Amino acid sequence: MSNSTLAQSNIPLKQNGLQSKDPVSATSKLQDTTKIKPADSTKSGQDTTKKKGNGLQAEVSIIAVDSQKSEVAKNISHLYRGAKVKYQDFELSADYIRLDRNQKKIFASGIYDKSGKYVGRPIVIMGNGESPKTVDSLYYDYEKQEGNTYGIMTEVDGGFIQANIVRKNIYDEMSIYKGLYSTCNLPEPHTHFGIHISKGIVTKNQIISGPAYLVVMGVPMPVAFPFAFFPKPDKRASGFLFPSFGEDYTRGFSMRDIGWYLAFNDYWDSEIRGSLYSKGSWEVSMNTRYTVNYKFNGGFNIRYANTKTGVEGTKDYGSNKDFNVTWNHTQRQEANPGTSFSASVNFGTTSFFQNTGTGSAQNNYENLARNRMGSSISYGKVFADGKVNLTASLTHSQNMADRSIQLSLPNISLNVSSFNPFDSKDRVGEQKWYQRINVGYSLQAQNTVNTKDSLLFSSGGFKRFQNGFQHNIPISLSLNAFKYFQFNTSVNYTERWYFQSTRQRIDNTPAGYKQRLDTLQGFNRAYDYSVSTGLSTKIYGMYPKIGKIEAIRHVVTPSINFNYRPDFSDPRYGFYQQYNDQYGNRNVYSIFAQGVYGSPSAGKSAGIGFSIDNNIEAKVKSKSDTTDGGFKKIPILQGLTFSGNYNFVADSLKLSPITFSGRTAFFDQKMNVNFNGTFDPYSIDNNGVRINRYAIKDGSLARLTNFGLSFDYSLNPKAAKSRGDNIDSLRKQMSNAGMTPEQAQALARISSDPNAFVDFNIPWNLAASFSFNMSKFFNTSTRRMDNQITSTLNLHGDFSVTPKWKVTFQSGYDFKQKEVVMTSFNIYRDLHCWDMSFGWMPFGRYRSYNVTIRAKASILQDLKLTKRASSGGGYF
């Protein structure tokens, strides 16, 4: 039960003890007091009474919409239908009110209509900032501000409190008789978690209860207390976190996520949790969140797991020790304009998610398929009136398959907005050609290392870092030439600064010749430059009417450019050196080949680059679309592009491979299709090596060396829109710094897993995605070119069996492996104030099932009943 629920149901009550009689019931006492027919009633109207000298300090205002009956001798008024009474901050409305001016007392109740339904219950407003309260009936002394309330029910923090009799005194102390706190909003809860309290006293900071017992789904539990004390603070308070219970195939019975909540202040809190398994495995975690309104928010989570493997007493018995650390930080833009800071960190042992993925409370199966972890901490600053942008970041990338790790500490980028150095601020008229010259500048700096995670912190690990600076100065000029052509020319200069360079050599050792790579410390600079100039234009074509198609428009954008780059392997630059191997062959290498920004290119290039882009769309008549004269545009091909380059100065293979890519959409933009590939214009020899002979001479225009195709489609677009809208809603809550850990988890799940969001308002959804990739390679065993093909079909969807039952599924098929990919089925049941879900992975390494029942009330998010079972896999 929430520590603050009863405090919010403040109804004016009598001070001197609980009433001994039974509470008024809707079938007995309320019926006797409300079935009053105003035979001698007067006309409806308003009466205002004001008395002084006897303790009454304000007017009593009364209104009766239907009628009013007065007992003049006793100074009593009876008000009917929509009656209202107001005294100071106290307001009362009901279908029947009896006002006794001599005794300064009010009785209010509902009435029974012709169908026998009890309607017009009293609604009380106290004027102290609390929400209105609805009750069955009440007695109230408006001078002493005390009385009895019968049959109250109110919502508190997602839960509901009911009490037969409630009494409160002028000291803001409240007594309850036969109370119930429940997660169900029905007068007779059908499924709920609740605590029945026979008698209790509620003060500002505490609740003192007499005999109380626990009820789950209407069944009294063998958990009762002769008395209890509950602190009731008016802000977040530290407390116990309820665990969940389950069973794993090899870990045994479990008690998961038991812990303690620490509320340090209004700006940060923390959860410390632990999980225990009957066969010796255990996990601990500390999840801390912090926020400063309108400035920043974030949190970090540190997790450690000790997972037992094998059978105790055998040689395979042991334990895996894993850890994982995550940190996220977001800064509000208005907190510090022009400056940004953000962090997204996720690092740990490579086997953490595989060993704990389905054992965690999140039950996130996507963690099982995770093969990379990455982190980024970045800082940005804009200055010089927005013309200069500086960013610095620390990045981390970890491959969980081969245990390789890449660190960049740090990455720095400085970018200066492009400008026209020869233009004038006071210029009048159009720019002259030289005033159109555009210059930019950028600087990148990097300090990085690639190694294995086991070697990172070993002796000399930090000596493996490589670093360098790169300056880039692009100069460009764009002009309109001959009316229909766009003329572009550019010069690009790049300079690299390194603090290491390498030397290669061959050593003759007793074991034979060995190639050596030596790293020399010291400052070195390397530079390159290139020149390019070209023309582009647009050609428009219209095709005549074909059937229902009014017109087809074809836009062709051809471009051609001349490019030149010197041979930077020339000895006069000093960027390349050579050595002779054991066979006397001369080998040329770059001394900057190991540099973080690479080396200037070898070989002169002077050639023509070309590309052609196509966009084809049709115009058809549409009755639903009245824009553009009642015509609708349908894209046929978007961005179909071919590009390549011809190098005049190359001694052979002058024509580069021709790349192509394109996209289109079908079914009113509901299915998107993307494709790409490469054509090689040259033939190959018997060893699969390209030779200086065009493929067209051997009977084919070109060789297709690789091709990729992908598409996705949803049969019910409303489902995708509903999921997107809910993601946006959760993100908006996050930006307001009011997101609970459960909401943050839900956001992460539905952003990455289409089945993680269940919308009972969408009756069905079926979506599919397909990817296909083909590449050519030379098979040394068959001495011919073969195809390497990968293709995967993924399906996911859901359907509602009834308005309260939802079934979801996710599966797919890998055509190369000829097996079904990870498959899961889930069944959701809306139990009004509870949620029930059943998840099943029928096959594969992680086949398992789980059943979860969770209360919907936000304050009871830690209350859940879970059953899990798993089989297979190395850690179950």
Image (spheres, helix red, strand yellow):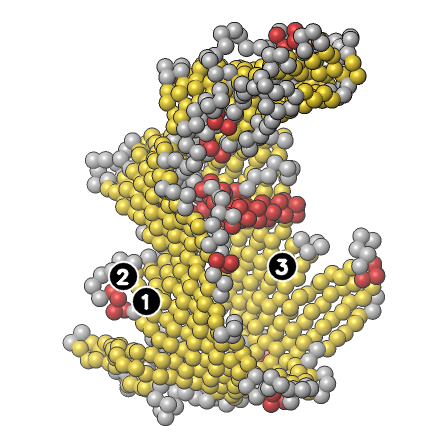
Q: Position of residue 427 (x, y in %)?
A: 64, 86
In this view of the protein, can residue 817 be seen by the observer?
yes
Q: Is residue 642 left or right of residue 545?
A: left
* Residue type, label 2: Leu
Residue drawn where x is 64% and y is 76% of the image: 612
Q: In this view, does 172 lie to the left or right of 874?
A: right
| Crowd tier of the residue under label 1, counting other residues whose Cα lies within 10 Å: few below 14, some 14–19, many 20 or above | many
Mark 3 or 2: in front is 2
Instruction: Kindly identify which numbered label has been placed on residue 449.
Output: 1
Mark 3 or 1: in front is 1
| For marks 1 and 2 on the same chain, the one whose residue lies earlier in the sequence | 1
* Residue type, label 3: Val
**Alpha carbon of mark 3 to alpha carbon of mark 1: how far?**
38 Å
Q: Is residue 198 above or below residue 762?
A: above
Residue drawn where x is 30% and y is 63% of the image: 451
* Residue type, label 1: Val
Which residue is disc 3 drawn over? 673
Instruction: Kindly identify which numbered label has been placed on residue 456.
Output: 2
Dot 3 falls on a residue whose secondary structure is: strand
The answer to whether the residues at label 1 and label 2 have Cβ atoms under 8 Å apart is yes
